[in-house]
Image (cartoon, rainbow, N blue to C red):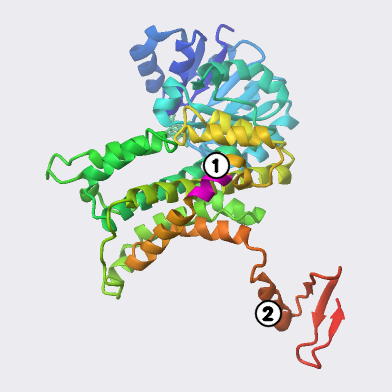
Amino acid sequence: DEARIGVTGLAVMGRNLARNLARHGHAVAVHNRTPSRTEALVREFGDEGVFVPAERPEDFVASLERPRRLVIMVKAGAPTDAVIEEFAPLLEPGDMIVDGGNAHFADTRRREAALRERGLHFVGAGISGGEEGALHGPSIMPGGSAESYEALGPLLEDIAADVDGTPCCVHVGPDGAGHFVKMVHNGIEYADMQLIAESYDLLRHAAGLSPAEIAEVFRTWNTGRLESYLIEITAEVLAHTDAATGRPFVDVVLDQAEQKGTGRWTVQTALDLGVPVGGIAEAVFARSVSGHAALREAAQGLPGPARSRVKESGFADAVEKALYASKIVAYAQGFHQIQAGSAEYGWDIDPGAMATIWRGGCIIRARFLDRIRAAYEADPRTPTLLTDDHFAEALGGAQDAWREVVATAARLGIPAPGFSTALSYYDSLRAERLPAALTQGQRDFFGAHTYRRTDRDGSFHTLWGGDRSETPA
Ligand code: NBP
């Protein structure tokens, strides 16, 4: 029992997490199904700290101090179940299994319940930041019992990213809470990337700027309120020239975006919870549209508007405002989903704490998240971030520009689903009356689905096929 914690699954993520632990002075037991990975880790990085390699699961488990902390970093899905089944029988009550993979939160809930029956703690930890994050400090979103967090928290906080002395790791809530929050984080990441892509597209095709010029625009934006990792790398990608052709890199890349599925999970779950997350959904659909090569090919000859250019002066500033406003909306929708999930599953998640641990380590890390943290600090029960003083002021200041950019996109035939849906959501929430009243009338007409009235309690039905009198339902 010489190792404080163990990692099994030593592909890029597990290896880097183990190295991160070792570099922080924690003796770490390491194991992998294929022993050559374990040997390679110790051979290449053995001098970074104390590694305790084991080939057999029994020896791996025996090398851990008690209660045991065992981190699984294998492929999500069936492999995770297989590894849990392999190790759980070797553990004792009170021991902890941490799944650091990208599990679906429903799987995490199932596994947690099953292992709790066997006296084991199961912690579903969302880990963001890719391989670099795993090595140098990820954002960690652990869900599980408070008791297990007491034993695990200090280690995880030690290896997590750090912003202003605050670790990017906090106990999110019970069972699937951590993986749920990680999922929504990824959904927000999709939305943010889509909005940035639309900004680029508008600057390119409405304003006629070159990729190199747009890179400069993003660099400037990165010194202001949009400062973020995603804006920073956008400038890098746009400034890059393809070595083989000498053309802008962005012009030689096939324009069909791929996805691994966490964005889709976010939208599927949002539909189940009844939470409108248009920004995330349009981002997932935008990737999907881009990949439908045959559809796009078939549509090539369809008519569009005569394309002209907007006057460049001031347009980039308008796009910056539209981007900031749309980003506020997309994040507000994501945080709404976190609050809805928390209520549905009884997780009691602190949304401000999520904004705090996303400030470093993860892909959406940004100055902006401090604003969200502050908004929840000012009003922990706010139903939407949009009404926070800072965000409301920014939305106010963006009004003309935001609408002008969406109108310009429509006029010139440049797709801007992210900007458009954000503005529609904003206007829907603002509207005093929505046409949903008409929808209710239609539903009552064809299906006797009933409606409620603005002036009286109760449900009603109009006898549409008869004398059109109203009856209480
Ligand atoms: P992979 O997702 O590529 O998984 C490879 C690892 O799983 C290897 O250690 C492999 O062992 C092991 N494994 C498999 Br596959 N089936 C197994 C089984 N039946 N029994 C035991 N071990 C099995 O690794 P990764 O890219 O390092 O990602 C690990 C986890 O972290 C995943 O859930 C991933 O979604 C998540 N994640 C990844 C990133 C990223 O940037 N890559 C970021 C955030 C989260 P072997 O060596 O014997 O084949």
Tell me the quadrant of the picture where the C terminus can be found.
Answer: bottom right
Question: Foreground residue, 379 or 230?
Answer: 379
Q: Does the segment drawn in magenta span residue 396?
A: yes
Above or below for 176 versus 294: above
Could one spot residue 85 in this view of the protein?
Answer: no
Above or below for 53 versus 217: above
Q: Residue at x 33, y 40 (%)?
A: 218
Q: Which mark is residue 442?
A: 2
Give amino acid for label 1.
Met
Question: Which SS class for mark 2?
Answer: helix
Give amino acid for label 2.
Gln
Tell me the quadrant of the picture where the N terminus can be found.
Answer: top right
Above or below for 197 versus 362: below
Q: Residue at x 27, y 70 (%)?
A: 300
Could one spot residue 57 in this view of the protein?
Answer: yes
Question: Which portion, as a residue range, is magenta?
Answer: 392-397
Q: Which mark is residue 183?
A: 1
List x then y, in percent, for residue 358: 52, 32
List x then y, in percent, for residue 165: 54, 17
